Amino acid sequence: MTGPGTSGPDNGHGAAPHDTSHDDASLAELGYKPELKRTLGNFHTFAAGISYISILTGTFQLFYFGVAHGGPAYWWSWPMVFLGQLMVALCFCELAARYPVAGSIYNWAKQLGGPHVGWLGGWMMLTASMVSLSAVALAYQVTLPQISSWFQFIGDGTGKSAAANAVLLGTVLVTFTTLVNAFGVKLMARINSAGVAIELIAAVVLVLLLAAHIARGPSAVLNTFGLGAGESLGYFGAFLTASLASAYVMYGFDTASSLGEESKDPARNAPRAILRALIASFLIGGLILLFALLSVPDLHAKELSVDGLQYVVLATLGSTVGLIVLWCVVIAITVCELAVHTAGIRLAFAMARDNNLPAASLLAKVSPRFQTPVLPAVVIGLVAVGILFLNVNQPQIFSVITSIAIIMIYLAYLAVTLPMLVQRLRGRWTPLEGKFSLGKFGLPVNFLAVCWGIGMSVNLAWPRAAVYNATGPQHWYLRWGAFLFIGVVGLGGFAYYWFVQRKKTGVLAMHAAVRPGDDDTPDSPTPRTP
């Protein structure tokens, strides 16, 4: 099929200079006028995707969890998660080429499943973004105190004092990302791109350094430590629990498309950025984890399942090199937090532009000075800090918040891939001609993406004590915390939408695409049939 985003037939003599009017035409097809300045190039969109995934942040934050619950053999969850997420990413690539728009998950779900599915998908993704912002902020606690005890401001770093200190450090980080995002996309992109460059260089150097210290053969990653013995599912059950550590890393690649309204030639660059970010993260991250397990002096050291990769780096590379690597990890955490915050802001802006959030006209307002939505940056930052403080005395804060964040992301992705599969089965989905297309593989890839999303959502939400009630007395409401929290957010949010916001939905006139004969009234929403 063809659409407003196409630039005419290819003459076979190379690409002509890109005309941004075609990007704006794609936006107008969705009913919006261009308001966000197109300043981001190819590397910026790639950097946005890979900084959200953030190889160093995720691997260093939950490596200890994977080893503790799955032993060295947990490494095999890394390629498993990659293959599952690759199916999702390939579906997203077709959508990114067809609809390069802010708040991509929300707008894609709306186009494929209708306004109600779109709202629920957007709401879940928005909530997940705020929970993820809290989860990533906790990574400071895993790294900074190991660089210096000076960063352990509260207590000795164990139990409740670790959680309290994590909240303090996380609040500082969220405050920083709020300010940067409020001051505009250019500043964000510069910091993000510089941080990603440092992270990629540091990650490659870390792979080489660990490879130079290999102390055992690759068969080490077949070692299960006897975990799962006596359990109903045996080691497979332990492996599924440990897979949380890998699932936490490889998501957020859709951020490259969520900046579509601020990118140059997004229909071409966004699909490439999505795949490059995911594949680069898989290759580099997988090698880091593999060589860490092969190079650590003692594979049975208890520190491996307590301090994780931080311990491996310091024990294997020595304190000087190790501290340099850990500072690079801090930079990676910072730009990851920045990317998560940025994606959340674009999603809130996209939903508010459709008058689908309270105080929509304020949330959708673009600052004429900074050319970015400022209020969503502040609101999302405040909510993320609030989530941190609600868990200030909970020692299991790390696994609980992280798990819930991942599950909600998976559910939001399902709000896109499932309606997309239905459209394919009905013969109503055709990729944009001349852009990214899966061709005959579209249906099987989409089917696998849906199966993967459902399977991993159930696995991650399963009421395991190891994840949701790891310390202290056992309580049913903690064990079922994922179902309870997500149920309240999903059902409560949709009830609000159905009884209140649904009747108001429609593109706010100040954001609507101007068509010949339109009455340019700045205040009232423009009803729109999806």
Image: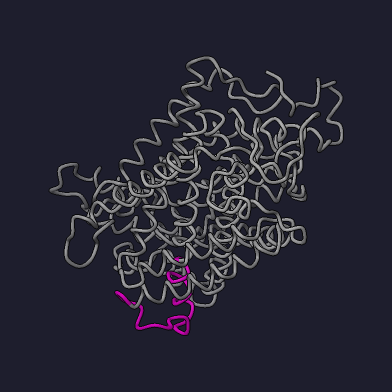
Is there any visible trace of residue 79 in the rendered image? no
Front residue of 429 and 382: 382
Residue 242 in picture, x, y percent from top left = 32, 51
**Quadrant of residue 299 within the rendered picture:** bottom left
Front residue of 101 and 406: 101
Front residue of 509 and 185: 509
* Residue drawn at point x = 62 percent, y = 55 percent: 362
* Residue drawn at point x = 81 percent, y = 35 percent: 21
Residue 178 forms part of the magenta stretch: no
What main secondary structure does the magenta stretch of the protein show? helix
Residue 140 forms part of the magenta stretch: yes
Instruction: Give the left or right position of residue 361, taking residue 301 as reference.
Output: right
Residue 68, above or below 5: below
Q: Residue pushed farthest left?
A: 230
Residue 189 in picture, x, y percent from top left = 70, 57
Point out the image quarter for the N terminus: top right
Point out the image quarter for the C terminus: top right
Residue 221 in picture, x, y percent from top left = 35, 50
Q: How many marks?
A: 0
* Residue drawn at point x = 68 percent, y = 34 percent: 31
**Quadrant of residue 395 within the rendered picture:** bottom left
Image: magenta residue range: 138-160
Q: Residue pushed farthest top?
A: 427
Is there any visible trace of residue 439 in the rendered image? yes
